[in-house]
């Protein structure tokens, strides 16, 4: 008997973490004591960061992950991330601390730890974990903005958006279909309201999403047929139609209605 789709996604995540643990079982060594901004990080904490990665307290690890790359020695920064990546991935996972990953994941990008330059096996293990994270996010019923935060962080870390959109499009099953519908509606309305911006990934191009959404039309249409009362699906199709036609959406912008003191009006199907 096969696993339910939601459990299958978690199995993929656990398997990906197991591979990460194996690949990073022998953490790379540092070339000397950790060199960081002592205004932000005490020297005693720098010594702890240079020790066994497993002995670094969670709060200190979180501080390191949030601190900008320029506050650390450039040559050591990538090595530190390679030493902590198994724990970092767990913080971003379904059993993590639940914080928005879109900023911190970007520390792995080309202006930070340069994940793209890591040894092939290490990079492959991290990217497999990213694919599993997205699989869980799209299929576990979370709101679309939590999925988009994760996508931004992963795209920033890897320097590309297209592979992750392709990965989402290849996910199958009813939970994946529902997640894609929520994502399409959320992104579609943000594009129509000219609100879709990447908060931390300044090199990201939202027009890649605008070009991707119409490729989902057949899938969303089939979902709408199976679930005729699903407003997300019908509204996602309306948003895609408007994007392709280059017209305004069918909804009043919510901010305008709040300014007028009235209720937020959503398109009535």
Image (cartoon, rainbow, N blue to C red):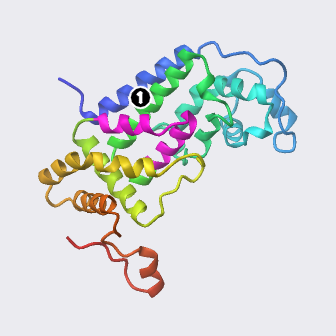
Q: Mark 1 points at which residue?
A: 13
Q: How crowded is mark 1: few (under 14 residues within 10 Å), some or many (20 or more)?
A: many
Residue sitting at x 54%, y 33%: 158
Find residue 8 and report its horizontal and vertical position in percent: 30, 29
User: In the picture provided, is 213 more to the left or to the right than 195?
Assistant: left
Say which of 226 and 49 sits in front: 226
User: In the picture provided, is 98 more to the left or to the right than 69?
Assistant: left
The kind of secondary structure the magenta stretch mainly shows is helix
In the displayed structure, would residue 149 be above or below residue 133? below
Residue sitting at x 69%, y 27%: 78
Residue sitting at x 20%, y 47%: 218
Q: How many labels does the image show?
A: 1
**Residue 34 lies in what quarter of the image?**
top right
**Residue ranking furthest to the front:** 245
> What residue range appears in magenta?
147-171
Find residue 77 and report its horizontal and vertical position in percent: 73, 29
Find residue 68 and report its horizontal and vertical position in percent: 72, 42
**Residue 3 lies in what quarter of the image?**
top left
Task: State the quadrant of the C terminus.
Answer: bottom left
Say which of 182 and 118 sits in front: 118
Residue sitting at x 21%, y 45%: 219
């Amino acid at each position: 008997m096969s696993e339910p789709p939601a459990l299958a996604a978690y199995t993929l995540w656990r398997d990906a973490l197991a591979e990460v643990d194996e690949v990073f079982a022998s953490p790379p060594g540092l070339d000397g004591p950790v060199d960081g901004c002592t205004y932000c990080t005490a020297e005693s904490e720098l010594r702890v960061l240079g020790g066994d990665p497993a002995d670094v307290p969670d709060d200190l690890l979180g501080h390191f992950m949030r601190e900008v790359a320029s506050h650390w020695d450039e040559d050591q920064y990538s090595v530190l991330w390679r030493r902590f990546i198994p724990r970092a991935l767990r913080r971003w996972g379904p059993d993590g601390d639940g914080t928005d990953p879109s900023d911190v994941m970007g520390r792995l990008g080309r202006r930070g730890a340069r994940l793209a330059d890591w040894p092939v096996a290490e990079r492959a293990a991290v990217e497999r974990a990213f694919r599993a994270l997205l699989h869980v996010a799209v299929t576990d019923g979370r709101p679309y903005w939590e999925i988009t935060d994760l996508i931004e962080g992963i795209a920033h870390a890897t320097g590309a958006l297209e592979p992750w959109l392709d990965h989402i499009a290849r996910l199958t099953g009813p939970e994946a279909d529902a997640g894609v519908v929520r994502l399409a509606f959320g992104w579609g309305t943000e594009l129509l309201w000219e609100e879709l911006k990447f908060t931390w990934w300044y090199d990201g191009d939202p027009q890649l999403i605008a070009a991707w959404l119409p490729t989902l039309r057949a899938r969303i249409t089939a979902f709408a047929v199976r679930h005729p009362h699903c407003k997300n699906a019908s509204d996602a199709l309306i948003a895609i139609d408007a994007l392709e036609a280059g017209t305004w959406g069918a909804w009043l912008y919510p901010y305008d209605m709040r300014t007028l003191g009235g209720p937020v009006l959503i398109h009535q199907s």
